[in-house]
Amino acid sequence: MTSFSSTTDPNPSRPPKFPPHNAPRVWLLTSGNSPIGIALARLLLAHGDYVTAGVLPAEFEKHEDRAAEFRSFLEEVGQQETWRARLRVVALDIRIIGQCQSAIAEAVESFGRVDVLFVCTSEAIVGTIEELSQSPRTLTLVRDQFETNFFGPVNVIKAILPAFRAKKQGHIILLTAITGHLGTPGLGVYCASQWAIEGYCDSLAYEIAPFNIKMTIVQPNMEINVLTNKITSAPPLGHYAPDTNPAPLSREILSGLLDKLEGTAEPTTGDQLSSPDIRALYPPLTGPMKAALVAETVHALTAIGGHDNPPARHIVGFEGVASVKEKLKTVSEELEDFVEVSTAVDIVREVEGDFGIGGRESE
């Protein structure tokens, strides 16, 4: 996991780049009340684009801190008449296909179309593979992980395709992370959900290309989807404690990071990840921390979204690129080390030399 400070834009006053055309775009954000959703919506409205922001009702009602930032954003929008006319907020639980269809229908009803679908809904389940196999409850966490990170995006993507095909144009942007390339100890199920949705979208890209529908996977150089969304931790097993298992598990890394972010020397929020019970929390990030964390990614999204020729995959930040390159280098070296094992064996000649027709040994 990269350092927090590395995500800070070296020139935060630099305006983000938008595609080189003047026509406003219509965006649908699947998690409009997330830090990256709010930051992106703010820039899009300032640029003149239209935004339909999906909000998970249960999350908005149960988590006051999470809702407070979005309410503050809505107050900001209310003070600017031009922004107010270009923003719609809809209830959206992407795990429910009917809500996905309703959100898209409302966006089309309000603004005439959808140009860019930004899928940014995510959550992270922390725990080793064995820890997540302890009980029916932890196994449910695994299913919940895939419902949110895989089947949810699948639902909203399937719901938007008819509208995109009808107008022969559209752009789907999926926010994942470099965990789509790199396995991470203690986040195995989270990584699995990322790999699954990326494989789905990589395949989908070929299928929808004839309809002029673009597909882009954006991978931030830091786990934005982990640090800006809900984290749920399974009860730890003693076998994986740091004093008995040298693997750098994500539980310990995240626990230390959360305590530092909270600005206290005593374990508090981070300590919850080591609780003997299942715990869910939102990282205690301040407003400036969130802004610094998502700045690079928001900049990339504004440059890519709706572009006539967007990249199929974009890794945000030098550190993320370096991590993926190192992974690919390791794979290449292993292929070279075992290239002879991968060579096809010519067994036909040996069989013909030792056996006659019918499989009996030659005289």
Image (cartoon, rainbow, N blue to C red):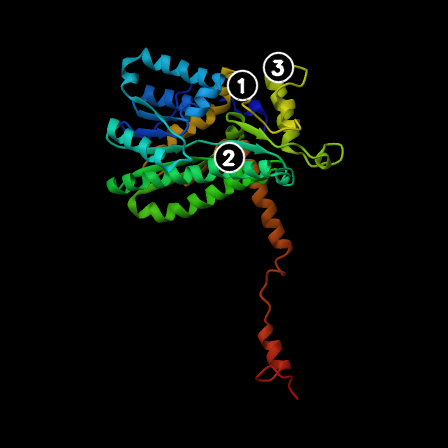
Residue 207 versus residue 345: which sits nearer the camera? 207
Where does residue 254 sit, x and y in percent of width and height? 61, 27
Amino acid type at image mark 3 = Gly
Determine the residue positioned at 50% across, 26% down: 229
Residue 276: tell me if it is visible.
yes
Residue at (46, 41) in percent of width and height: 197
Q: Nearer the viewer, residue 240 or 172?
A: 240
- Badge 1 marks a residue whose secondary structure is loop
Name which quarter of the figure residue 255 lies in: top right
In the rendered view, tell whether residue 212 sits above or below residue 335.
above
Instruction: List x then y, in percent, for residue 27.
Output: 33, 29
Give me the C-alpha separation between circle 3 and circle 1.
10 Å
Nearer to us in this view, 310 or 184: 184
| Amino acid type, label 2 | Ala
Looking at the rendered structure, which numbered label has been put on residue 285?
Answer: 1
Quadrant, the N terminus: top right
x, y percentage for residue 259?
63, 20
Q: Residues within 10 Å of mark 2 (few under 14, many from 20)?
A: many
In this picture, residue 40 sits left or right of residue 221: left
SS for tag 3?
loop
Residue at (39, 21) in percent of width and height: 15
At a point 34% along the width and 39% down the height, the residue shown is: 159
Single out the mark in the foreground, 1 or 2.
1
Which residue in the protein does label 2 denote? Answer: 177
